[in-house]
Amino acid sequence: MESPFNADLLKGKVALLTGGGSGIGFEISTQFGKHGASIAIMGRRKQVLDTAVSALHSLGIPAVGFEGDVRKQEDAKRVVDSTFKHFGRLDILVNAAAGNFLVSAEDLSPNGFRTVMDIDSVGTFTMCHEALKYLKKGGPGRSSSGGGTILNISATLHYTASWYQIHVSAAKAAVDATTRNLALEWGTDYDIRVNGIAPGPIGDTPGMSKLAPEEINSKARDYMPLYKLGEKWDIAMAALYLASDAGKYVNGTTIPVDGGLWLTKPRH
Ligand code: HXC
């Protein structure tokens, strides 16, 4: 689908995306690139990174991949520094890396719980922490007036409660709290906006194929207000809005992009 935004919306900007090589993260990488940004992708799997970077190059998008695990602070630091070295600035950090699997609370080991907290919550904070020096106003490659921006990909699971996702719900609740607290501290001190997006069920993603078998999928259509799954494009458009000047007065919020699903209950 055609983007409603101008192609130069992010012209001259540099974005670093964790988990930017697949699923929702890759769609955001692509759309940011199509709107003028240069793209750095961080991920654990070299082959996924290579494929993603080639795909971006074939669209004429400047892109580079860096292997790394958001659970390792030294990886986070190396990738943030490498992004700056490669492109000479950093304007947008997108935390899209996430771990997930369905398991009952009874069967989930504390280490399984901790693993997802480490990836989603601690990983998000670690990336923000390491990126701060480049994102803050007056930082390397920046003027003394404008700061960069952070986008944290969250979920709607924890607005209520979700079966077999206690670990992810807890982790995303922490992500949302991190979004608000960084928006307060870094918005005030460094002119950095920090926001989130909470996707609903989005078709053609690792999350959906892993979490929602086909029958759940079709059942959901009976009570979803918009009667359809979202597309990765929907999330990328929200990301463009929040990361660009279109969202310049938006700070500390997480926007659900789920067709209103989290509000709904089955009719019967
Ligand atoms: C129960 C599991 C498990 C499973 C791992 N564990 N998978 N427990 N069921 N399916 C437990 C392990 O037993 C272990 O605990 C601990 O977690 C660590 O497991 P490892 O395999 O050593 O970890 P690691 O190799 O680092 O992998 C972590 C991972 C990750 C979380 C499994 O690789 C992963 O999920 N990758 C998929 C990424 C993904 O799907 N992304 C899309 C996210 S979608 P013990 O106690 O045995 O040591 C998303 C959407 C949310 O986030 C909202 C949806 C609406």
Image (tube, rainbow, N blue to C red):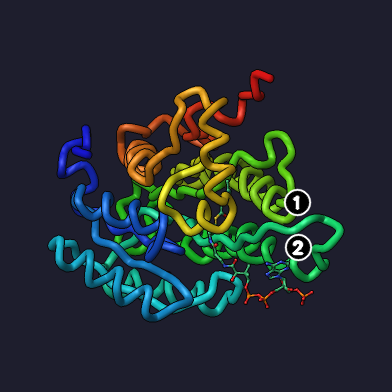
Query: Which residue carries the number 1 mark?
Result: 166
Element at label 1: helix
> Cβ(mark 2) to ligand 1 < 8 Å?
no
- Is 227 on the left or on the right of 210, as rendered? left
Is residue 225 in view from this perspective? yes
* Residue 195 visible in image: no
From this view, report whether residue 258 is shown above or below residue 217: above
- Front residue of 64/158: it is 158
Q: Residue at x 44, y 78 (%)?
A: 45
Please tell me which residue lies in front, 82 or 196: 196
| Furthest residue in direction front, as rendered | 215
Of residues 125 and 202, the one drawn nearer to the viewer in this rendering: 202
Residue with the mark numbered 2: 113
| CB of mark 1 near ligand 1 (< 8 Å) | no
Q: Work out whether 108 lies above or below 145.
A: below
Residue closest to the eye, 229 or 234:
229
Amino acid identity at mark 1: Ile
Identify whether 231 is placed above or below 87: above
Tell me where residue 235 appears, x and y as whole percent.
40, 42
